[in-house]
Image (tube, rainbow, N blue to C red):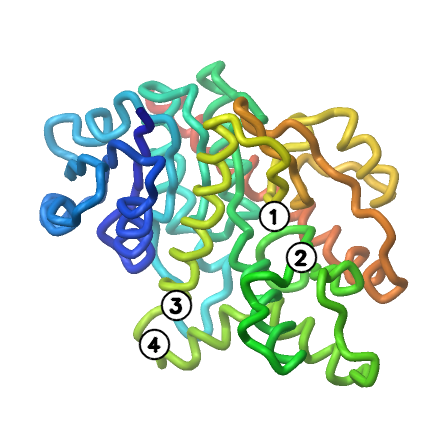
Amino acid sequence: MVKAVVLGAAGGIGQPLALLLKANPHVTELGLFDIVNTPGVAADLSHISTPAKVEGFLPPDDGLKKALAGADIVVIPAGVPRKPGMTRDDLFKINAGIVKDLATGIATTAPKAFVLVISNPVNSTVPIVAEVFKKFGVFDPKRLFGVTTLDVVRASTFVAEINGDLSLSKDVVVPVVGGHSGVTIVPLLSQSSHPLPSSLSKESYDTLVNRIQFGGDEVVKAKNGAGSATLSMAYAGAEFAAKVLRALKGEEGIVAPSYVSVEADTTGSAALTKELGQELAFFSSNVELGTGGVTKIHPLGKITETEQTLIKAALPELVKNIQTGVNFVAEAYKAEDSRL
């Protein structure tokens, strides 16, 4: 029996994500929570002929608590979407408060659940969840994940396109490390399972890297103010959730990039820190998954000078993003204490 919960289940990412989780054979119960429309989404999904029993909850009558009760895995796509001209930092002010409140609900109702954070900016929202869990004494770094899978999905798709065969996209594996916004997204194209054509020019390579880093902007612009990358993000979130669920069921050898606390594997993160040349509290690298969450953080491995330059550019931004999340929680609790 596995219960999955989607917080923000009525939104642009939440609805397709809930649909994909309803279709996942490992899920036997699906809890949905949002501030509007969740009972309707749940009713709609409940007619689908897959085993998962679906329930939808709204905030009144302890809805969040009811949705989270008995959760094994919680996926958080809640928050407002990015609009044209809006940076992920602009999003922060709105989404940070939402994520903090949801994290409080998880800490008090389902502290042992695997928590997968999609709400942007992930570089800051994952540290927010960690700080809330620490406040409640339930932080387990092995069970908290920032979902960076969309960067991996984009890299796979774009590399397949460049190789002239989209049918390869499911097989192409490109490690994407760093974080989950702009320059913090570092695709290690030299480690792609399907090498780029040797004839690829430096200009085309730079364009590809930029497209992977700023793929979200491409979608925001194409939707012309009507939304952001919701469908591809839902697909990526469901793909990563499926890997976590397979590991939870005992499947071994599952490795995928995710933005995690370096505390999840001190030995692995020590090697990673040596490669990076500085210590960070969170970083996205290939992680091995097990029944208890993160079992191993993999090092970067052999990378090119160009990739080293990209990582160097990512680090100061990551440090700033992480601190922004930590500071937000500290200031929020300070304000709450002063009102008591």
For the residue marked with disc 2, what is the amino acid?
A: Thr
Report crowding for label 4: few under 14, some 14 to 19, many 20 or more residues within 10 A (C-alpha): few
Q: Position of residue 299 (x, y in %)?
A: 79, 41
Callout 1 amino acid: Asn
Looking at the image, which residue is at 41% across and 66% down? 229
Q: Is residue 187 left or right of residue 218?
A: right
Earlier in the chain: of badge 1 and badge 4, it is 4
**C-alpha span from label 1 to label 3:** 21 Å
Instruction: Evaluate if marks 2 and 1 touch, with contact meaning CB atoms under 8 Å apart.
Output: yes
Q: Amino acid at mark 4?
A: Gly
Callout 4: SS: loop
Does the CB distance between marks 1 and 4 fall below 8 Å?
no
Which sits earlier in the primary sequence, circle 2 or circle 1? 2
Estimate the spatial distance between the alpha carbons at disc 3 and disc 2, rounded to whole Å: 19 Å
Residue to which mark 3 is pinned: 228
Do labels 2 and 4 touch, CB within 8 Å?
Answer: no
What secondary structure is found at the residue carrying circle 3?
loop
Say if 242 sits above or below 215 in the image. above
Q: Residue 11: x and y, percent?
A: 26, 55
Does residue 191 appear left or right of residue 214 in this picture?
Answer: right
The amino acid beneath tag 3 is Ser
Residue in the foreground of this view, choosing between 216 and 157: 157
Q: Residue at x 54, y 71 (%)?
A: 215
Query: Which residue is disc 4 drawn over?
Result: 225
Calculate the distance from the C-alpha at mark 2 to the C-alpha at mark 4: 25 Å
